Image: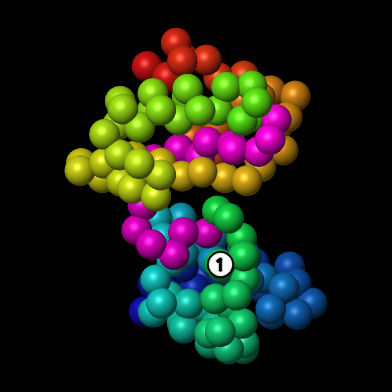
């Protein structure tokens, strides 16, 4: 069930749109901001508020890379694995991060602090290799920077 605060924030987003469905991504972001991920129950509740089917909203949620449909840690580390980042040092960074955190891609540390994810592109080819920690973009990232 959506909280009063979530409903209030989603309603504010709805006021900015001609069609309720146009607020889909922003509504999902509201839920994720409060819960760190978007559950099936949240999909149903938000879809009802937007007058669309849960399947339509789930299609949006699963298409958009940074809407998390499974629980994630307090901090999400997304490493760009585009061709440019890969060619400029993605693999050594990935290996070092996996070793330091003790997790692989798609996993969360035991203390729920970090989730490590690959991402197809961060749009930062000029700063490759790049990574996103929560909403902060870093690049070019070197192994020395990971500590």
Q: What is the x, y in percent for residue 56?
A: 61, 82
Q: Locate the C terminus by quadrant.
A: top left
Residue 24, by quadrant, is bottom right
Where does residue 60 sit, x and y in percent of width and height?
62, 71
Q: Quadrant of residue 38?
A: bottom left
Task: Let me know if residue 79 is in the magenta part.
Answer: yes
The residue furthest top is 144
- Read off the residue under disc 1: 62
Residue range corresponding to the magenta coloring: 67-84
Q: How is the image coloured?
A: rainbow
Picture residue at 79% right of the left edge, 77% below the top = 18
Q: Quadrant of residue 94?
A: top left
- Of all residues, the one furthest to the right in this rendering is 18
Q: For the point 46% across and 82% down, which residue is it?
A: 45
Circle 1 residues within 10 Å: few <14, some 14–19, many ≥20: few
Depth check: give the residue in front, 143 or 10: 143
């Amino acid at each position: 069930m959506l909280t009063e605060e979530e409903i209030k924030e989603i309603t504010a987003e709805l006021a900015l749109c001609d069609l309720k469905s146009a607020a889909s991504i922003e509504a999902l972001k509201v839920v994720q901001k409060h819960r760190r991920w978007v559950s099936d129950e949240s999909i149903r509740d938000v879809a009802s508020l937007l007058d669309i089917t849960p399947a339509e909203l789930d299609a949006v949620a699963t298409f958009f890379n940074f809407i998390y449909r499974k629980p994630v840690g307090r901090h999400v580390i997304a490493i760009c694995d585009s061709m440019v980042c890969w060619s400029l040092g993605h693999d050594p960074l990935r290996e070092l991060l996996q070793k330091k955190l003790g997790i692989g891609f798609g996993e969360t540390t035991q203390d729920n602090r970090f989730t490590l994810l690959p991402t197809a592109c961060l749009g930062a080819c000029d700063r490759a290799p790049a990574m996103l920690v929560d909403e902060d973009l870093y690049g070019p990232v070197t192994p020395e920077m990971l500590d």
